[in-house]
Amino acid sequence: KQEVTQIPAALSVPEGENLVLNCSFTDSAIYNLQWFRQDPGKGLTSLLLIQSSQREQTSGRLNASLDKSSGRSTLYIAASQPGDSATYLCAAFSNSGYALNFGKGTSLLVTP
Amino acid sequence: EAQVTQNPRYLITVTGKKLTVTCSQNMNHEYMSWYRQDPGLGLRQIYYSMNVEVTDKGDVPEGYKVSRKEKRNFPLILESPSPNQTSLYFCASSSGASYNEQFFGPGTRLTVL
């Protein structure tokens, strides 16, 4: 079964800093990898989807990369803002199943 | 506006009282699924549906039922809720194949006393 791990579990940075969130997965046979944002008590907002044939995707200040051979994905946030404070989840969709396998998330706090 | 809606958003109930959480999407998506989110365990899939009348179990299906009679709706049924089903529930949908971008509903916070 696909196992997805996110490190660190929590991160606090000052406003304006660039940061990287890490995600690793055990089974490289994936269809895609999706990054989500979750605000406290709220739903999941899709940030970026990287198909298995892609190496990276960009949206505004966000850039996500995918390296299937090493089983890793990173989410890069440029010029962080307090409004970026949330939990970030990565999820891999494996070839062998019909579900997104989620990591437990990285809780990000951006301080003014 | 393209969206996945869930009702109710919050529910407190008692053990054994049957309940249904509704999920509806307006994007004509074929694939729909239910997840539950628990502290320390993350999100886990309960059931999924590839299309109308096609459903299958996810990782944690015990105690739940689903049906897919219409493309837009995918209700989650708890026939006899128990306290261990207290959780935050999410419905998701995607177009075409199940591995396309998933869109999630706002969540339903269920407490079973």
Image (tube, coloured by chain):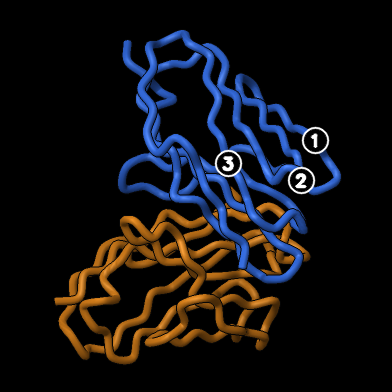
Specify the colour of chain A.
blue
Q: Which mark is residue A23?
A: 3
Eye-nearest disc, 1 or 3: 3
The residue at the point 70 percent across, 78 percent down is: B51
Point out the tag, 2 or 1, that comes first from the N-terminus: 1
Instruction: Give the numbered dot on residue A68.
Output: 2
| Secondary structure state at the residue bearing disc 2 | loop
Q: CA distance from mark 3 to mark 2?
A: 11 Å
Q: Quadrant of residue A70?
A: top right
Q: Colour of chain B?
A: orange
Q: Which residue is mark 1?
A: A55
Residue B84 in which image quadrant: bottom left
Classify the position of the N terminus of chain A by image quarter: bottom right
> Height in image: A85 above or below B48?
above
State the SS at label 3. Answer: strand
Residues at marks 3 and 2 touching, judged by CB atoms closer than 8 Å:
no
In the drawing, does residue A82 fall left or right of residue B30? left
What amino acid type is highlighted by mark number 1? Arg
Query: How many other residues sit within 10 Å of disc 1, few (<14), some (14-19) or many (≥20)?
Result: few
Counting residues from the start of the chain, the first of labels 3 and 2 encountered is: 3
Which residue corresponds to the image point at 50% horizontal and 51% vertical from the top-left? A103
Position of residue A35 measured from the top left corner of the image (x, y, whole percent): 59, 42
